[in-house]
Amino acid sequence: MKKGILYSCLLLCVSASYSCTTAFWNNNSEAKVVARSVDLFKPDLPKIIVYPRGTARHGDAGDNSLEWKSKYGNVVVSEFNSTAASDGINEHGLVAHLLYLTGSTYEERDKTRPAISNTLWAQYILDNYKTVNEVIAATDKFQIIATVVSNQKWPLHLNIQDSSGDAAVIEFINGKKVIYHGPQYTTMTNEPAYNIQLANLKRYKSFGGKLPLPGDSDPLSRFVRVATYLKTLPAPNNIQETVAGVLSVMRTAMVPFGAVDTSGNKTEDAWPTRWVSVADMTNKIYYFSPTTTPNIIWLDLNTLDFAEGKPVLSIDPNQDSLVGDIKKRLQS
């Protein structure tokens, strides 16, 4: 009976117009690294932004929006020419990612509590915290609400990692916050909710089940592939091999242009990979690779000046001329 219920839920929950994957390699001896992809039915117009300490923020959540000044400098990726930051790392090596989850239902709004837009959730965390433990301890201090970006609301869940190897997934299901906290949570995609993803994983050979590795591009299959290949990565000998290793896993989850999710036939059911990032939390380096350009670019946070009063710097990463360290190409 339980297997039947699980299978029925899987059939109902696999479509997403904004698909993403994360792969956290936290059990090697060289560096804690996490890769992340963004798969979307339309270009997301990414921009890499460097924010100094002391940046003033507004939660964009209507009445009683949270307001703050950033404690820590960070590098983020914004989307749709907005303040929405879907990915990033701060100067202490805390990393945050926002991923699509159709089933996200946030708490009923209580205007006696401060709130922030879900599209600023990752930015707030990178501005204010050093570790996953700090983030978890602060989750009840504010509410999350869905707001409109690029003419639609984005139901989102959060994935965070830090330089110690700790990790967490935070979802809102049926108006209730659900947290999965620990270094064992190294993979995340989209639908369905995380508890169902974990249950589905046990159906496959590498996790005690009988099914072979799936080959399609839906979120459940990408989750299984990434979780499986993270287990089989050879020990790296240096940082280059560490970054290459986690990228090799992420490439098994990338979605080709033209691939269509078989669970639907709308434009939104084709969501090719738009870009991939890798955050090296140990060495504080943020790598970025758009799928429309041939090169990998990066920023070394150790060389950036995050002092309060410094200008906000940014760059459009979709430029063919960009390669390697892009610090000198940043503009205010």
Image (tube, rainbow, N blue to C red):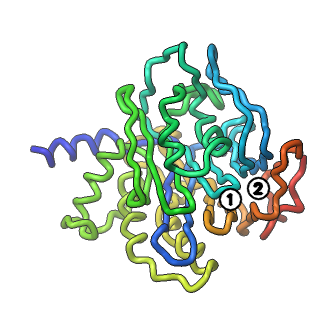
Image height of 143 relative to 129, above or below: above
- Displayed quadrant of residue 227: bottom left
Label 2 sits on a secondary structure element that is loop
The three-letter code of the residue at mark 2 reads Pro
Q: Residue at x 82, y 49 (%)?
A: 314
Q: Position of residue 144 (x, y in %)?
A: 53, 28
Q: Position of residue 329 (x, y in %)?
A: 88, 59
Q: Upstream in the sequence, badge 1 or badge 2?
A: 1
The three-letter code of the residue at mark 1 reads Pro
Q: Residue at x 58, y 80 (%)?
A: 241
Q: Residue at x 26, y 41 (%)?
A: 9
Residue 115: in sight, yes or no? Answer: yes
Q: Position of residue 64 (x, y in %)?
A: 62, 16
Which numbered circle lies on residue 317?
2
Image height of 151 relative to 100, above or below: above
Q: Which residue is mark 1?
A: 290
Depth check: give the residue in front, 259 or 81.
81
Mark 1 crowd level (few <14, some 14–19, many ≥20, 10 Å Cα): many
Depth check: give the residue in front, 90 or 84.
90
Label 1 sits on a secondary structure element that is strand
Image height of 224 relative to 160, above or below: below
Q: Is residue 200 left or right of residue 246?
A: left
- Displayed quadrant of residue 98: top right
